[in-house]
Image: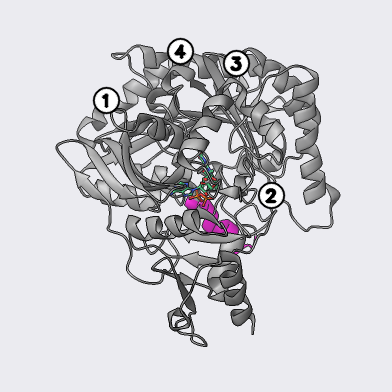
Amino acid sequence: LLLTFAICRLIVTVGLNIDPTDLLSLGGATASVAVGGVQLSVDQSDMESASMDFGMLTRAEPLAVLHPSSAEDVARLVKAAYTSAQVFTVSARGHGHSINGQAQTNNGVVIQMSGSGAGGRKRVGPRPGPPRVFQKERFVDVWGGELWIDVLKSTLEHGLAPKSWTDYLYLSVGGTLSNAGISGQAFNHGPQISNVHELDVVTGKGEILTCSEEENTELFHGVLGGLGQFGIITRARISLEQAPQRVRWIRVLYSNFSAFTGDQEYLISLHEQPDAQKFDYVEGFVIVDEGLINNWRSSFFSPRNPVKISSINGGNGGVLYCLEITKNYHESTADTIDQEVEALLKKLNFIQTSVFTTDLPYVDFLDRVHKAELKLRSKGLWDVPHPWLNLFVPKSRIADFDKGVFKGILGNKTSGPILIYPMNKNKWDQRSSVVTPDEDVFYLVALLRSALDTGEDIHSLEYLSNQNRQVLRFCDDTGIKVKHYLPHYTTQEEWMDHFGDKWGRFNQRKMEFDPRHIMATGQRIFKLSS
Ligand code: FAD
């Protein structure tokens, strides 16, 4: 009955002439319907997973789900949506790791881009081709739904790897390129969107266009950081470098915030000196409570060497800051890595007794958060609501943010890691759609919180959401001009404010590439036009 209802809803809403013989496999394990020459699934498990995301904060059930085998499948469906008398929406979904329903839609079709790679869910039908590495040219062509973990595995077979990463690799290429894609390499290589040579995009009119710096440039820059508004990335050509073999991974602690940020800023300034020795990755995190130092991102410290804040901080509690840095190397240069790291550490002002070092294969370092995911999953702590708050904070106000938020609003319980690291704005292409603060250096501050049903108020979704609002109000009241990363707003006025002087161009690109506003409506920037 449910299935019939779903299909009827689809037929009525889509308003297409669907031949009854197109309704396939009814009553079987999968159910599908053909629209615009492609087979859509209304299978309950497909519908269920397309209705949810990592955030577990919003839910929207689509009319159907498409598992595309090619860019042509995507184009056929989008064309049907665009030309239909009764327009319907089309939302690409990568790995569904958004927080606020950005890949969801309840009046259209979700295109499930990620599929059967090592990291993906099982998919129906043939999958698009695997990554294709061009060794001499040092780039790789990948399907938009490919997960970064699978991109890494493919390129490593050729001794190569992408240059810029996210902390977690079970995210899709199209999903991170629609935001920016950042991690500790961004200070040097820029975000992932700065490391793309070319894209194939299915626009909101259903055309497949190749775009790059030289060809269809408005589309190219618009799509990068474009929150899925201008088209669906079906192929990305990603820049590669020779892959390191091993990583020296170091953490050092600070109790003084300005010493901590001073060192971070010094380390990221080294990118301007091409010949200088520098770390390959610079991140950091804030430790406001004892529990956190041995938390999911810090398994590093434990169980062999658990750390007590009080033992480091002179027993006075308070906030600690951890600088996290790495140096990549090849086994052939292993004999010099100690001296190189030593020379770099000598210039820093951390608490001298607080150096924690480990050494591991490059893949294990890049895939570090997945290990933590498996642990959390086993304890039932992964599939919980995630009221995350990710902000770009201008360098000139980061000390005020520390005083007001880390040492103020957060108290001594944070319900998850707090990342903090600076990036150089000149590594971000201003022609892309992404918005950053108006300063040469800005920080990512990520409050990665999980709401738990412990009965304790401080772990509740309401408490944490309220704290997020307090943080934003504090920034407003004190004039700290933050920009949201992975933004989420519900009115166009808020979006216009977010984009600032980029709004005009963003809006113009929307009119050109998605005139009926059918794409990625889960972002709630534009309303579907009739
Ligand atoms: P989805 O949630 O599926 O989609 C996100 C948006 O992109 C939607 O609007 C969707 O319509 C659109 N979209 C998806 N695929 C395409 C496509 N092919 N073409 C056009 N639009 C598309 N981000 C970082 O930058 N750095 C990190 O270190 C980082 N770590 C994370 C760790 C975890 C555990 C989680 C849950 C998220 C993390 N993120 C990080 C955020 C992540 O990059 C974004 O949420 C990203 O959108 C997730 O990719 P996805 O494939 O799951 O996208």
Which residues lie in the magenta part? 370-380
Callout 4–callout 2 Cβ contact below 8 Å: no
Residue 188 makes an appearance in the image: yes
Residue placed under numbered mark 4 in the picture: 347
Kindly report the distance in space between the C-alpha atoms of the residues bearing marks 4 and 3. Answer: 21 Å
Helix, strand or loop status at disc 3: helix
* Residue 395 image label: 3
Q: Is residue 297 above or below residue 453?
A: above
Mark closest to the chain's N terminus, 4 or 2: 4
Residue placed under numbered mark 2 in the picture: 450
Kindly report the distance in space between the C-alpha atoms of the residues bearing marks 4 and 2. Answer: 36 Å
Helix, strand or loop status at disc 1: helix
Three-letter residue code for mark 1:
Thr
Mark closest to the chain's N terminus, 1 or 2: 1
Q: From the image, state whether disc 3 or disc 1 is nearer to you.
A: 3
Q: Is residue 339 above or below residue 239?
A: above
Three-letter residue code for mark 3:
Lys
